[in-house]
């Protein structure tokens, strides 16, 4: 997220914060020496009347802020450069910026990718299934949108720790070499897949299933819009391995961002209720057919990308043509015609 935040700061947020929280709201040439003394012992500097001449400036002057540079304190308010009292590395600014960026980003990613999958990949015949709910697409969207703020709030500490330099993200491939760069992709997928397998399987435990994970299994025949339709804590819990990984293993910064987008796309793709079988990777990749069976039978195919964990821990179910939910639709239509 620090890569995205740097771009946003450069092209938008620096100017925005300079307008919303201007440094000039906290200083004036008339009390520069007094302000310097207060700045050492207080996070709030009183606004000098007329510094900006607006009610907003008066309100802003009571906001917390880090110590303002002496060179700015010595300038007349009318001569100060357009700069914010909240620099880029101020934790409150980072938290607010990350929240805004993530909320905008996840809504765009969800609606763009889910819509593309829904209109161009999802078989709309599935909506005739007896277990497809009335107004289900709308319910899936509403569930997702309501879950985003809670998931964002829970995820924010990870993002803040990342942008403040506590992760093991690196910028130059030469730091670890191309061999490690390639290996890290496989490590990332295996690590997150294995962790999510167990998190997902534990969420099916009777202690927490009903209130935590059952809301997602409301969609027996899901559409791509069900991909993010979770209880907020459920969605967050299954995202923990992605955040944890970069604090345990070196990972390229740009690659991390690319993987984040691709993983969200994969999450959408596996919720298209597809039952295409007999392809070469069927026994290796936990694809849409496998996840369709998970929604239909609940206790099988917990994996995110691969089938190996399900195979190892006896929860694997092989997709088969006779399990295709479309067969139930055809049977129901045939029965209706006979009646």
Image: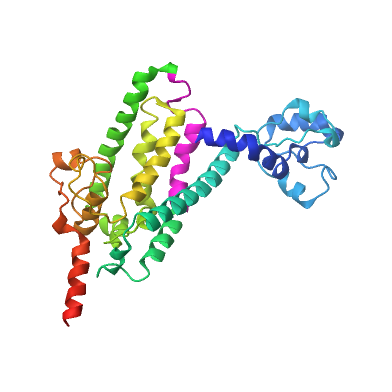
Which is more toward the observer, 178 or 276? 276
Query: Is 132 inside the magenta-drawn segment?
Result: no
Picture quadrant where residue 178 is located: top left
Looking at the image, residue 124 sits to the left or right of residue 204; the answer is right
Q: Residue at x 34, y 49 (%)?
A: 269
Picture quadrant where residue 219 is located: bottom left
Q: How is the image coloured?
A: rainbow
Task: Locate residue 258, reporting x and y percent.
Answer: 43, 36
Q: Is residue 192 above or below residue 128?
A: above
Task: Locate residue 266, reporting x and y percent.
Answer: 35, 45
Task: Locate residue 176, reporting x and y percent.
Answer: 39, 17
Please, what is the dominant secondary structure of the magenta stretch? helix
Q: Is residue 215 above or below residue 198?
A: below
Which is more toward the observer, 185 or 300? 185
Task: Locate residue 10, reporting x and y percent.
Answer: 63, 34
**Quadrant of the snapshot with the C terminus:** bottom left
Is residue 92 visible in the rendered image? The answer is yes
Which is more toward the observer, 236 or 264? 264
Picture quadrant where residue 244 is located: top left
Q: Residue at x 69, y 39 (%)?
A: 15
Looking at the image, residue 219 sits to the left or right of residue 281; the answer is right
Looking at the image, residue 293 sits to the left or right of residue 186; the answer is left
Is residue 231 visible in the rendered image? The answer is no
Looking at the image, residue 23 sits to the left or right of residue 76; the answer is left
Q: Which residues are magenta?
A: 149-173
Query: Is 151 inside the magenta-drawn segment?
Result: yes
Q: Residue at x 22, y 49 (%)?
A: 290
Query: What number of labels is visible?
Result: 0
Q: Is residue 202 above or below residue 284?
A: below
């Amino acid at each position: 997220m620090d890569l995205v935040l740097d771009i946003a700061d450069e092209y938008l947020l620096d100017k925005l914060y300079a307008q919303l929280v201007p440094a000039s709201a906290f200083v004036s040439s008339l009390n520069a020496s007094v302000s310097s003394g207060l700045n050492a012992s207080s996070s709030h500097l009183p606004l000098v009347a007329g510094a900006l001449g607006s009610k907003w400036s008066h309100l802003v002057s009571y906001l917390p802020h880090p110590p303002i540079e002496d060179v700015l304190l010595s300038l007349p308010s009318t001569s100060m450069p357009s700069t914010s009292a909240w620099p880029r590395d101020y934790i409150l600014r980072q938290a607010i910026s990350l929240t805004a960026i993530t909320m905008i980003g996840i809504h765009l990613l969800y609606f763009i990718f889910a819509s593309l999958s829904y209109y161009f990949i999802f078989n709309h015949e599935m909506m005739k299934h007896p277990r497809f709910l009335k107004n289900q697409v709308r319910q899936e969207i509403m569930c997702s949108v309501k879950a985003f703020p809670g998931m964002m709030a829970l995820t924010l500490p990870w993002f803040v720790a990342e942008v403040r330099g506590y992760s093991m993200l690196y910028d130059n491939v030469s730091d670890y070499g191309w061999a490690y760069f390639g290996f890290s992709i496989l490590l990332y997928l295996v690590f997150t897949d294995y962790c999510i397998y167990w998190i997902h399987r534990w969420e099916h435990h009777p202690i927490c299933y009903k209130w935590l994970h059952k809301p997602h299994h409301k969609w027996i025949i899901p559409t791509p819009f069900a991909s993010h339709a979770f209880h907020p804590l459920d969605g967050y819990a299954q995202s923990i391995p992605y955040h944890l990984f970069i604090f345990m293993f070196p990972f390229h910064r740009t690659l991390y961002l690319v993987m984040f987008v691709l993983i969200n796309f994969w999450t959408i793709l596996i919720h298209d209720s597809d039952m295409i079988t007999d392809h070469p990777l069927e026994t290796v990749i936990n694809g849409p057919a496998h996840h369709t069976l998970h929604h239909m039978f609940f206790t099988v195919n917990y994996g995110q990308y691969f089938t190996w964990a399900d195979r190892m821990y006896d929860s694997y179910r092989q997709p088969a043509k006779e399990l295709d939910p479309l067969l139930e639709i055809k049977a129901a239509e045939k029965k209706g015609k006979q009646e």
